[in-house]
Image: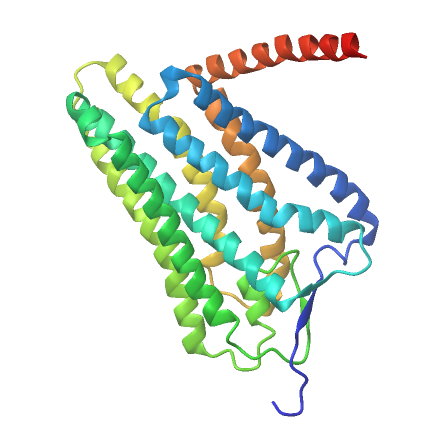
Amino acid sequence: MSNHTTIITFILWGFSSFPDLQVLLFVLIFFSHLTIIAANVSIMVAIKLSHNLHTPMYFFLCGLSFSETCTTMVIIPRMLVDLLSESKTISLPECATQMFFFFGLGGNNCFTMAAMSYDRYTAIHNPLHYAVRMTPKICAQLMLASWMVGFLISLSIVNIVFNLHFCGSKTIQHFFCDFLPVVSLACNYTSYHEMAIFLLSAFVLVGSFVLIMISYVFIGSVIMKMPSAKGRYKAFSTCSSHLTVVSIHYGFAGFVYLRPKNSDSFGEDMLMAVTYTVLTPLLNPIVYSLRNKEMQTALRKVISNTNRIMPHRINKRTENM
C-alpha cells in the first residue's frame, strides 16, 4: 500500500460509456426530475390544505413524498451536471455526504412505509379505537423513529466505507456514490467489511419488509373474516396503493443490494439505480393519485385554486406597471 497514492477525489464515470446518448438522457432525466418535484409538492400541498386529509395515512404519505423529493435532490442534480460536464470529479467528503443522505433518506422511506402498513392494520383491525391508537403524537413518534433509524444505519455504513484506504483507480463505475462501486476501489476491503455492510443493508430492507408483511398478514386475516364482499373490497382498496408502492420499491432495491455481487454487475446495478432514483419517485405520486379518490379531489382543488390565483396576480402586476 505504500507504493500507492491515497485518493482524495473520485471520478463518477456514470454514463460516459454512452457519449452519444448523454444529451438525450439529460433531457429525459431533467423533465422527469421536474415532474417528480411537481407531483410530490402537489401531494404535500393538497394534504396540507385539505382538512379531510389530516389523517395518519396522509400524514405518512406527506412524509414519504417529502423524503423522496429530498432523495432525488441528493442524486439527480449532480447527475444532470455530470451528463453535460467534461469534469466528473467529486471529492471524498462530497462523496461521503452524498452517500450519507442517500442511504439515510432511503432507510427513512423503508421504515415510513412500514409505519404506513401498521396504520392500515390498525384502521382495519380495530376501527373503533383507531383514533386512540394513532394519535398525532404517536404518528410523529413513528415518523421521527423512521428518520433516526434510517440515518443511524446510514452513518454506520458511511463510517465503514470511508475508513477504508482508497488507492489505485479512482473511477467510480456509477453516476453517484453508491457504496458497492466505492468500496471496490478500496485497498483493504475485506469480507468483514462486506458482511457488516450487508447486515446493515439487510436490517433496513429485510427488517422493514418483514414488518410490512406482518401487518399485511394480519390485515389479510381480518379482511377474509368480513361477511360481505363489498366490505372486503373496500378494506383492501385502502391498502392497494401502498402495496403497489411497496412492490416497486422493494423489488428494485432488493435486486440491487441483496443479490450476490461481482465487478461485472456494476453496469446492471447502474441501470437498476436509474429505476429507483428516477422512476420509483415518479411512479409513487402517480400511484397514490390515480388510485385514491380523496387525493384526486384534493389535487383538483389545489389546481383550480392555483389557476384562479395566478391570473389575478398577473393582472395586479400589470396594473402596478
Front residue of 125/320: it is: 320
- Residue farthest toward the bottom in the current orientation of the protein: 2
Give the vertical position of 90 relative to 45 (above or below). below
- Image quadrant of residue 134? top left
x and y, in percent, of residue 215 in the image: 25, 38
Give the vertical position of 167 relative to 112 (above or below). below
Q: In the shown orientation, is residue 277 left or right of residue 124?
A: right
Q: Quadrant of the N terminus?
A: bottom right
Q: In the shown orientation, is residue 261 left or right of residue 202?
A: right
- Image quadrant of residue 33? top right
Give the vertical position of 1 relative to 85 (above or below). below
Q: Residue at x 44, y 74 (%)?
A: 193
Q: Quadrant of the C terminus?
A: top right
Q: How many marks?
A: 0
Q: In the shown orientation, is residue 186 left or right of residue 227?
A: right
Front residue of 320/139: it is: 320
Colouring method of the image: rainbow
Q: Residue at x 40, y 52 (%)?
A: 150
Q: Is residue 227 visible?
A: yes
x and y, in percent, of residue 11 in the image: 71, 65
Q: Residue at x 26, y 35 (%)?
A: 137
Front residue of 28/76: it is: 76
- Residue farthest toward the front in the current orientation of the protein: 320
x and y, in percent, of residue 16 in the image: 76, 58
